[in-house]
Amino acid sequence: MNDNGIPYKTYLSENEVPDAWYNMRADMKRKPAPMLDPATLAPVQADALRKVFCDEAVRQELDDASQWIPIPGPVRDFYRMFRPSPLVRAYFLEKALDTPARIFYKFEGNNTSGSHKLNSAIAQAYYAKEQGLKGVTTETGAGQWGTALSMACAFFKLDCRVFMVKCSYEQKPFRREVMRTYGAEVTPSPSMETEAGRRINAEHPGCTGSLGCAISEAVEAAVSREGYRYVLGSVLAQVCLHQSIIGLETKTALDRLGVKPDIIIGCAGGGSNLAGLIAPFMGEKLRGEADYRIVAVEPASCPSFTRGRFAYDFCDTGRVCPLQKMYTLGHDYIPSASHAGGLRYHGMSAVLSELYAQGMMEARSVEQTRVFQAAETFARTEGILPAPESSHAICAAMDEAMRCKEEGKSETIVFGLTGTGYFDMTAYQAFNDGRMGDYVPADAEIEASLAKLPKV
């Protein structure tokens, strides 16, 4: 415990693992727009979604009214293996920055999957098992989600097929091998094994892949096999719901310390970890009970919030999924092969997109080399090697801490440390060798992709 009485780490007890997820949509006066059938442009009904997703997942996806969704007993029991996760006061980082700001981070990397993704993976695997399914298919970017789902499927004895973004498949071979160790079949995407993959390869020769590409292949693989369903690791409302456990624990720990955050920061690709971290705080903001600055941080190479358009678009590059109203760069946009593979998605969660459109949160983009500079500082001060995705939040938190220093303010900053970077050593090697560069798309490149948005 430091001089001011706040411990370095705050742990809740196993009995304090939340027994229900919080649904932000229930407190939103203006709800996210419904998914649309691309053929008819009518709102997608539950029966159509059940052909792709597990029945209970569909129910949660369409539930805009229930404020709390009970966590099933077996899922909560599994959570106790790695939850509650610690809330850490970054005293050493504060000292290195010589800032009056107080910095806290919620560390989600203390499980075998190495990230927050296990929070939703175990829930979706449980629902698939309860439904009597044989297995599931999915996509993964950097591999955290694929690893988490492989682990969850092994626990419930389900088959698991993962389409992994091709550049990450090649950059992160050890995360791929963890998936295989848990019994998953891992395929680089776009592949030649699906109609969607073959079409994407034909339209984009030499394609390094994207989450949008991998989603197309995983959905096709699910609907073409009896007894299988598709599960998604981010973007969807149900996934944001499951991740609310992060924010619920964070708020309980901060309340125990008597601390109210001024700024809450999370990295944003599809949006699940950010939605989870901010959930109870955003709920207070929506209900008019408190106010916070909430900041989404995305890569400059894939700036959905900061340079995208709020419009209906396909959730996948192969155009097999429903249309979702979200901030998007266009379903045809293929991000550069950056090392933050988990953030290489052309769109953003519909829930977060609606909140951003309402002015309830901020967004900024950061170049890759700045992100790794922040990651290096954090590793050298706090002793954890962060994932490239998480390091976007670290970078923004450091920027806010330096602003506090310049302005002489002692604000409280909370950010999400979504996972560890121990399987991302190719990225760290490129940075350490001075071979890492920054790619920022030109306006013309983004506009060319946005020109292909569906006419809704």
Image (tube, helix red, strand yellow):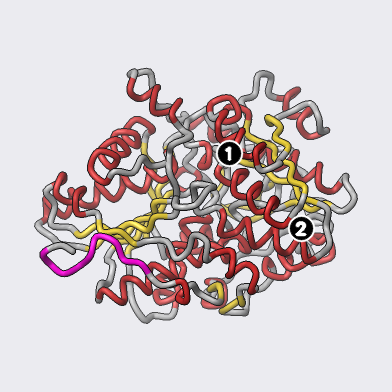
On whether residue 8 falls in the magenta region, the answer is yes
The reply, left or right, for residue 403 in relation to residue 220 is left
Q: Badge 1 is on which residue?
A: 141
Q: Secondary structure at mark 1?
A: loop
* Residue 388 in picture, x, y percent from top left: 42, 38
From this view, report whether residue 238 is shown above or below residue 28: above
Q: Is residue 36 above or below residue 346?
A: below
**Dot 2 alpha-carbon crowd within 10 angstroms: few under 14, some 14 to 19, many 20 or more:** many
Is residue 65 inside the magenta stretch? Answer: no
Dot 2 falls on a residue whose secondary structure is loop
Residue at (37% x, 34% y) in the render: 367
Q: Is residue 429 above or below residue 383?
A: above
Labelled pair 1, 2 in contact (Cβ < 8 Å)? no
Asked if residue 449 shows in the view, the reply is no
- Image coordinates for residue 213, horizontal then vertical, percent: 68, 36
| Vertical relation: 381 (above or below) 171 | below
Amino acid under disc 1? Gly
- Residue nearest the viewer, comparing 286 with 265: 265
Q: Which residues are magenta?
A: 3-11
Between 240 and 175, the one lying in front of the other is 175
Q: Find disc 2 in the rendering and name its residue.
A: 53
Q: Main secondary structure of the magenta part?
A: loop
Residue 176 at what x, y percent from top left? 61, 34
| Residue 173, position as x, y percentages in the image | 57, 28
**Which residue is located at x 34 percent, y 34 percent?**
372
Callout 2 amino acid: Phe
